Image: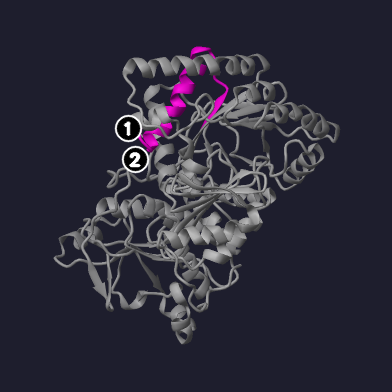
Amino acid sequence: MSYCANPFSYQRRATREVAVGKVGVGGQNPIRIQSMLTCDTMDTAACIQQTLDLVKVGCEIVRITAPTVKDAANLQHIKAGLLEKGCDVPIVADIHFKPEAAMEAAKWVDKVRINPGNYADSKKFKIIEYTDEQYAAELDRIRERFTPLVQLCKERGIALRIGTNHGSLSDRIMNRYGDTPLGMVESALEFARIARSLDYHAFVFSMKSSNPKVMIEAYRLLVARLNGEGPDWNYPIHLGVTEAGDGEDARIKSAIGIGSLLSDGIGDTIRVSLTEDSVHEIPVGQALIRQTAKLANFSHPENAELSWDPFSYRRRESHELEIGGVKLAGEQLVRVLIRQAQFDKIAHKIERMGDYKPEIVYESAQIAEVDPRDEPAISLLNESGADRLVTVKDGVDLPVITAFRLLAAKLQSRHPILLKDTLTPIHEGSADFLTTLLNAATNIGSLLCDGIGDAILVQGEPAPGQAMRLSYNILQAAGSRIFKTDYVACPSCGRTLFNLQETTARIKAATLHLKGVKIAIMGCIVNGPGEMADADFGYVGGAPGKINLYVGKTAVKFNIPQAEAVERLKDLIREHGKWVDPAPQAEEAPVH
């Protein structure tokens, strides 16, 4: 199966164009940026103002939740109010659970997003063994529920997004395919086949997950399956990491998921999901697209046989080394390196840097630096009896991901690999931090998700403390090294039952010291139980002013008053033996 034209050379995937109102998605169009409103859909004035604010900063498509028929009907007034103000930005209705709401919304909007996992199914986490006949009967039931919406969209000339969420796969899919990227893809293809049987083709796909590895594998598998179905399955792709959270961590996680797929030529429209005001999502999306555009400047395509499976994560096998008393590669942690000049700037405070310490100094590590196209140099390393830590030398005129994929393809796997974020070290003041962060997260994070890399060096950020922080946060977001509390937090929308930004901040303040504990913070139950499947604990809006607490995907405490919920969450963590009292605060690098 092939998921892109050449994993060693950028080429954007060719797709058909799907019109979303006045905006074309796919085809020859640029990659489009979209976002979602955070206010109550019934608050018409607030929805209009938030939409205008988003358009002002560059948002091209705006999504609004429509959880009920009443909400869906109000989209008419929101759309009319925008047109009165001269704003014709395409509006997308976000639907979960209720086909009736979708039918109402489709009368007024330019696109409807449905989730195959809960559009016609109610998730109950039941274990049921379906026979082929029972499975076929379920598909007939879905066809009956989905067909009217497809026909209405076709009549009105509006688009659909068939958007699978890892956290809300149906019981039927879970029991046949498991909680897997394959299940996500099959869930979407079932709905796509129904649409195609009705001669409707104005749809796009998405495969969202809060775990970048799962998200990347699912999108790759989807595109490979579409390629296998035939050339007319060339539908556009919507990219997003769901429940990314807020701040630096959310931007890193989004860059790993979205940036790596864009680098492979996959993606026609993107949404960066932040637990922040929606306007902050747009600059991140714009920066990721600018970053991808630079890849087209490399005109000498490379090729080699893949050394990794793009559809299933496995860390590249290499022999363990010890450098300066620090072990790396093999079964060891992915290590963090620093240049000597940068180390000298922070040597006086190393003991106060807590979890953000450098582990190996680059110049002391006897690292072999090569151009991966230099066959004699690669052969010399492969013929040597000694294992070496190897990296791509600075100044090589290749994209970073291409360079390290080539190195991994040609170098014997016994040699560990040191990843770099850039092959052109950046000097003080020559780049803004958002650009540096997204570039580092995309390049290093993508390679880590490919299973490549035993150590990393961030050299695009000149401030050594911040470079250390960025290094460790990339490892955490890629799931390569867990050294602090991990949070899964959904972006706000009209379904949210509490203030997500304030609540997330309170929960972080109380639990940030719990290393290795994963906490999910969900505004409602749409994706909550599923997205929390690999979280230790969950805090979920159950009703206005009331919180449900989860252990894994199981609700264990219900209808807790919101004012008490954070303390009750701490009690729940204590009950399960994962609470420790916070230690004195170590010095951390400043957040930019």
Q: How many marks?
A: 2
Badge 1 or badge 2: first in the primary sequence: 1
Q: Is residue 398 visible?
A: no
- Residue 269 at x, y = what percent? 57, 38
Dots 1 and 2: beta carbons under 8 Å? yes
- Residue 323 at x, y = what percent? 27, 75
Prevailing secondary structure class for the magenta stretch in the rendered image: helix
Magenta segment: 177-205
From the image, which quarter does the C terminus lie in? bottom right
Toward the viewer: 127 or 561? Answer: 561
Horizontal side of 355 relative to 454 (left or right) equals right
Amino acid type for the residue under numbered disc 2: Phe
Which residue does the image show at 27% across and 54% down from the upper left? Answer: 316
Toward the viewer: 482 or 201? Answer: 482
Give the secondary structure at mark 2.
loop
- Does residue 173 lie above or below 36 as drawn? above
Dot 2 alpha-carbon crowd within 10 angstroms: few under 14, some 14 to 19, many 20 or more? many
- Mark carried by residue 239: none
From the image, which quarter does the N terminus lie in? top left
Q: Is residue 451 visible?
A: yes
- Does residue 30 lie above or below 575 as drawn? above
Marks 1/2: CA–CA distance:
9 Å
- Residue 173 at x, y = what percent? 40, 29
- Residue 86 at x, y = what percent? 83, 34
Does the magenta-highlighted stretch encompass residue 526?
A: no
| Residue 590, quarter of picture | bottom right
Q: Nearer the viewer, mark 1 or mark 2?
A: 2
- Mark carried by residue 1: 1
Horizontal side of 370 relative to 28 (left or right) equals left
| Residue 433, quarter of picture | bottom right
Give the secondary structure at mark 1.
loop
